[in-house]
């Protein structure tokens, strides 16, 4: 079945440093979504990417969808303590409605 | 902002008992979902529901699981005979243009 892997599993940065998480799917995706989950919380939708090579920005967050639509990345510039949480990518294939979540990257930010 | 509401927030049940998890999706959304997350692990798809029927389900969603939309607002997940390994956070979600997740029900089977 489809697998979506993320690296790294865990990253600890100091506030102000940059952070990137990478997402790789075993199959071509029709679109990819990114979610943030705070400790003890639920996934919160951040963004959806649909087009090959698409890049979208939300303030300090930059999202990219690969040309082959099998990988994606999330980059956070100048992290803040409020960025703490686990970041999941989640992909859809074809016309299926279900999301296959990635393994997640847990980000810890300290002062 | 519209929310997906889940009840209860925490349920403890004995192994072998039936549980019903309840969700109120966003009213103008058409697709409804159940996902689960075992502690510290990724979010796993269980089932999607569209037009009053299951549109997709995963291998996790076996005969012990069922979903219903008993009225115009509620969406329920029933586990007939709970097992220890059913202990997890269960998230309901609905989608229109994007997904909105509820805050989850933590199910503990003892």
Image (cartoon, coloured by chain):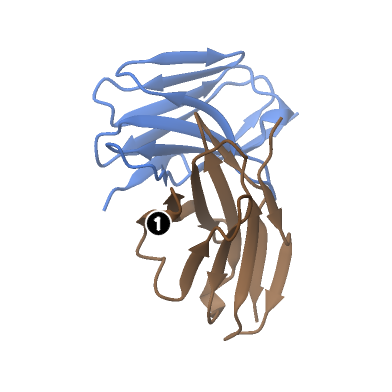
Chain colours: A blue, B brown
Q: How many marks?
A: 1
Between B43 and B60, which is closer to the camera in this rendering? B60
Tell me what residue is drawn at x 51 percent, y 33 percent.
B96
Which residue is at 26% across, 53% downward?
Answer: A1
Return the chain for callout 1: B
Q: Does residue A2 appear in the picture of this structure?
A: yes
Where does the image place residue B80, in percent across and percent down from the top left? 53, 78
- With respect to residue B12, does B70 lie above or below? above
Between A46 and B30, the one nearer to me in the picture: B30
**Residue depicted at 37% across the width and 43% down the height:** A5
Quadrant, the N terminus of chain B:
top right
Image position of A13 (left or right of A81) = left
Q: Position of residue A50 (x, y in %)?
A: 36, 23
Please say whether residue B42 is visible from this viewpoint. Answer: no
Give x and y (percent) for residue A51: 33, 18
Please determine whether, in this image, residue B53 is positioned above or below residue B99: below
Of residue A5 and residue A10, the one placed in the foreground of this image is A5
Where the C terminus of chain B falls, by quadrant?
A: bottom right
């Amino acid at each position: 079945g489809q697998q979506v892997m993320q690296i790294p599993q865990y990253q600890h940065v100091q506030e102000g440093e940059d952070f990137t998480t990478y997402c790789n799917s075993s199959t071509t995706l029709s679109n990819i979504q990114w979610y943030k989950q705070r400790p003890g919380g639920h996934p919160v939708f951040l963004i959806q990417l649909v087009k090959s090579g698409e890049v979208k920005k939300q303030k300090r967050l930059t999202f990219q969808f690969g040309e082959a639509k099998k990988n994606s990345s999330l980059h956070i510039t100048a992290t803040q303590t409020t960025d703490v949480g686990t970041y999941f990518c989640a992909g859809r294939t074809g016309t299926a409605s279900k999301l296959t979540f990635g393994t997640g990257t847990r980000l810890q930010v300290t002062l | 902002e519209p929310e997906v509401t889940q009840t209860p927030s925490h349920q403890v049940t004995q192994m072998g008992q039936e549980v019903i998890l309840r969700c109120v999706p966003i009213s103008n959304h058409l697709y409804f979902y159940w996902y689960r997350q075992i502690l510290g692990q990724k979010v796993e798809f269980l089932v999607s529901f569209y037009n009053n029927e299951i549109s997709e389900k995963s291998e996790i969603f076996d005969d012990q699981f069922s979903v219903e939309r008993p009225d115009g607002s509620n969406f329920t997940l029933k586990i007939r005979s709970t097992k220890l390994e059913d202990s997890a956070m269960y998230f309901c979600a609905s989608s229109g243009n994007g997904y909105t997740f509820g805050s989850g029900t933590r199910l503990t089977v003892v």
